[in-house]
Amino acid sequence: MSTRTADAPVVHLARPHRPVLVAGTLAELTGPTRGLVELPLRLWWHPHRAFDLDQHTMLLWMYENVLREAVRVDELRNHLDGATLLLVWPELNLPRGVRAAWEARHPALRRAALAS
């Protein structure tokens, strides 16, 4: 889903009233790729906030949450890894607006999704 005024670019929404935040480059995403990662309460409000990135399903789950909930670029940079995001992109369960915004900015993600 997106909104647009006559002179403004398309704004993709993660959910109602929440614009999607997209990193400028995948290379700037240098978050962890292994081990236990605890998300801040702002990104994951569950009492158990640790994700074991060595478990593929936990990695996917954490990436989905960060991509939906991030409101600051440092949240993306600190918790996502660009190369890993590219690898798991086709597997992520994301709102349509999140997927559209990221693929519009990073065509490599769109190509990865089409190749899967």
Image (spheres, rainbow, N blue to C red):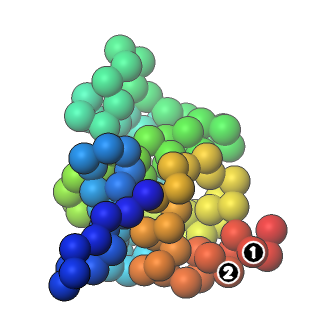
Q: Can residue 31 be seen in this view?
A: no
Quadrant location of residue 77? bottom left
Identity, as a three-letter code, of the amino acid under mark 1: Leu
Specify the quadrant that holds the N terminus.
bottom left
Q: Provide residue 58's location: percent of width, then percent of height.
A: 59, 36
Hey, which residue is sitting farthest front in the picture? 6
50 w.r.t. 47: above or below: below
Please name the residue shown 55% across and 50% down the image: 94
What is the residue that sits farthest to the top in this orientation?
A: 47
Q: What element carries label 2?
A: helix
Q: Can residue 116 be seen in this view?
A: yes
Q: How far apart are marks 1 and 2 (CA)?
A: 5 Å
Horizontal relation, residue 34 to residue 30: left or right: right
Could you tell whether 35 is left or right of 41 in the image? right
Nearest the viewer among 30 and 108 is 108
Nearer the observer, 54 or 71: 71
Q: Residue at x 59, y 82 (%)?
A: 108
* Residues under numbered marks 1 and 2 in contact, where contact means CB atoms less than 8 Å apart: yes
Report crowding for label 1: few under 14, some 14 to 19, many 20 or more residues within 10 A (C-alpha).
few
The residue that disc 1 covers is 114
Q: In this view, does 7 lie above or below 51?
A: below
Q: In this view, does 116 lie to the left or right of 47?
A: right
Q: For this rendering, which residue is in front, 61 or 22?
A: 22
State the image coordinates of residue 39 (x, y, percent, origin top left).
34, 36
The amino acid type of the residue labelled 2 equals: Arg
Q: Relative to 27, is 87 on the left or the right?
A: right
Considering depth in this image, is 32 or 18 the residue closer to the camera?
18
Query: What residue is rendered at 24% in x and 63% in y?
Result: 73
Residue sitting farthest toward the right: 116
**Residue 2 x %, y %:** 38, 63
Q: How crowded is mark 2: few (under 14 residues within 10 Å), some or many (20 or more)?
A: some
User: Label 2, on which residue?
Assistant: 111
